[in-house]
Image (spheres, rainbow, N blue to C red):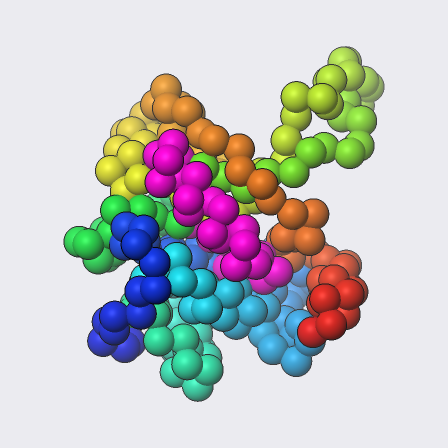
Amino acid sequence: MALFKKKSLRKTMTPYCTAIIAAAGSSARMGGEDKLFADLNGSPVILHTLRAFQESEYIDEIIVVTREESIVRIADLCAENGIEKATKILRGGETRQNSVLIGLEEASSEAKLIAIQDGARPLVTGEIIKETVLKALKYTAAVPSVEIKDTVKEEKDSFVSATVPRAKLRAVQTPQCFASEVIRAALENAKRKGLELTDDASAVEAMGGNVYLAKGSEENIKITTPVDLLFAEAILRGRGE
């Protein structure tokens, strides 16, 4: 579904950047509630995500890839809340990779950078978006990340098989940002080889590319279970929102 005509909203000299919002997940661990539309401080989770990218001067276009039954609802949220950068709301594929590829196919031909964001990661800030876009501009691929606090164990048959040194471990977040030709080639390569990957950066890694670990935030959480909503509410209260 096409929404607004593209407007010139650019405020920076950085290349044109399209944000693809991956929002076609099943919400399987939310106890029957669609996490995209769960209430978070008076607004649906997905609207918090969209607002962050609408307000970022480093993002020129937003494409949302979602489930078919959510298309009209998200389009209405965009229209009612001034998400003018949202040009298209598309039906997603069977996997995240397929959904992102669908979004890539519809991205503006002007796009030199692609930022891929979880729809259910509503506390992303303008600073994280800026940091990741600028690092991708410099290194061609960048992801926000945070240090691992917990001790991590490998498991075999319900017993610990090894303890993984955490000093070199990082938890990665979104938006994951890439030069457009890099992520296109990487995802096509992953599709061709039948690779099952948990994030978009893994596709670049599988192709032999380097991915820069930009600065993320412990507040940039993903809504996966009902308790995550409680954490998100607390974070927003701490921000004074």
- In this rendering, the answer to whether 217 lies above or below 159 is below
- In this rendering, the answer to whether 87 lies above or below 154 is below
Residue found at x 74% / y 62%: 235
Please provide percent x and percent y for residue 41. 69, 76
**Does residue 94 appear in the picture of this structure?**
no
- In this rendering, the answer to whether 114 lies above or below 106 is above
Count of picture labels: 0
Given residues 131 and 93, the one toward you in this image is 131
Given residues 173 and 136, the one toward you in this image is 136
Magenta stretch containing residue 226, yes or no? Answer: no
Residue found at x 61% / y 60%: 123
Please provide percent x and percent y for residue 241. 69, 74
Residue found at x 34% / y 48%: 114
Please provide percent x and percent y for residue 31. 70, 62
Residue found at x 72% / y 58%: 228
For the N terminus, the image quarter is: bottom left
- In this rendering, the answer to whether 61 lies above or below 186 is below
Magenta stretch containing residue 121, yes or no? Answer: yes
**Does residue 225 appear in the picture of this structure?**
yes
Q: Is residue 114 left or right of residue 30?
A: left
Q: Is residue 42 left or right of residue 55?
A: right
Please provide percent x and percent y for residue 119. 51, 59
Quarter location, residue 239: bottom right
Given residues 98 and 14, the one toward you in this image is 14
Q: Which residues are magenta?
A: 116-141
Q: Is residue 215 left or right of residue 157?
A: left
Residue that sits furthest to the bottom in the current view: 80
